[in-house]
Amino acid sequence: MFGWTFDSLEKQVGSENDIDIIVISAQDVSFPYQVKVSAPKYSVWQGKHRLTSSEWWAMSNARNTAICLAQDGYIVFLDDRCVLQPGWLHAVREAMDGNYAIAGTYKKVHNLVVKDGLAASWDNETQDSRMPYASNKEGPAPCGGEWFFGCSCGLPLEWALNIGGYDEDCDSLSFEDCIFGIMLEKNGYPIRFDPRMAIIQDRTPGQLGPEYKRTDKGISPCDKSHRILEMVQKGGRHKAPNYFGEGGIRALRERVLKGEPFPIMQVPQNDWFDGQLVKDFK
């Protein structure tokens, strides 16, 4: 339902035409819009060159694909099946002008009906878990990196490159958005939570496309998610140690923007948490 997003964005753009849209989709899609479409770059976790026997969660890989394809400027991430609420783009432009990373908010709903780029009706609404703790209801306010949820967020592209992109050690696990946000915070980049950057996401069961496996190994608090959180918060892991070769994601992006294809990746071969062979993930 990418049209929901495009139509709701179009209502807010006005006469300004400085927005490039990139769709990263594992499924074949096409649009009657000026949109760049790409499959996620190659990964050991999903796609035709995966090492696993089935498709696994690889959101860091997808977001890093977008980082490699984006032009210089300010990059904003959105999940699929979402409608931008009025004021969303204004909040983004304020963040661009103010030179800070912005964390938006969401409602998750079922059976969303969209008319003329606006959410008309829905049911089974779930509120953003951060909202009860937000001191600000109508504008941006400083927040910690753990509030940098991935469904609606933005930052200067250069900052994403400086920290190495999203940490692909979160692929097969998830939790990549908070880890990315904490890395931003640890590198001194300002982050603000802005409820005006709001979206409504449809998460109706049975309409969400293929399901990607993910697992948090271990028993809390001695599990994989707590381990990577500790490494980022206390262990000095303030940049993503991704597997892009010399020059990291910045060099990979330079090659891709010059027209080179994404390389076929066959690393990592083992899970960093317990050494399990990636090919043994079922």
Image: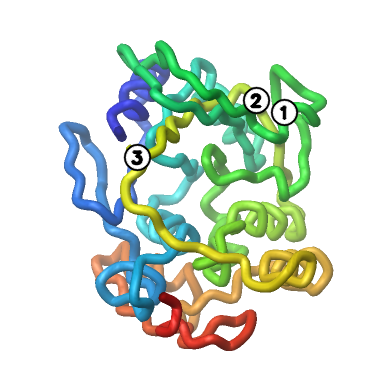
The residue drawn where x is 69% and y is 60% is 183
Image coordinates of residue 219 in percent, x first then y, are: 73, 69
**Picture quadrant where residue 213 is located:** bottom left
Q: Quadrant of the C terminus?
A: bottom left
Image coordinates of residue 174 in percent, x first then y, are: 56, 59
Q: Disc 1 vs disc 2: Cβ atoms closer than 8 Å?
A: yes
Viewer-closest of 84 and 161: 84
The residue type indicated by label 1 comes to Met
Mark sitting earlier along the chain (3/2) = 2
Q: Could you tell me how many numbered marks the image carries?
A: 3
Mark sitting earlier along the chain (1/3) = 1
**Picture quadrant where residue 125 is located:** top right
Q: Using the numbered discs, state the Cα–Cα distance from disc 1 to disc 3 in whole angstroms.
A: 28 Å
Residue corresponding to mark 2:
195
Q: Using the numbered discs, state the Cα–Cα distance from disc 1 to disc 2 in whole angstroms.
A: 8 Å
Which disc is residue 254 wearing?
Answer: none
Dot 3: element: loop
Crowd tier of the residue under label 1, counting other residues whose Cα lies within 10 Å: few below 14, some 14–19, many 20 or above? some
Which disc is residue 131 wearing?
Answer: 1
The residue drawn where x is 77% and y is 23% is 136
Viewer-closest of 239 and 39: 39
Mark sitting earlier along the chain (1/2) = 1
Q: Disc 3 vs disc 2: Cβ atoms closer than 8 Å?
A: no
The residue type indicated by label 3 comes to Gly
The residue drawn where x is 66% and y is 59% is 179
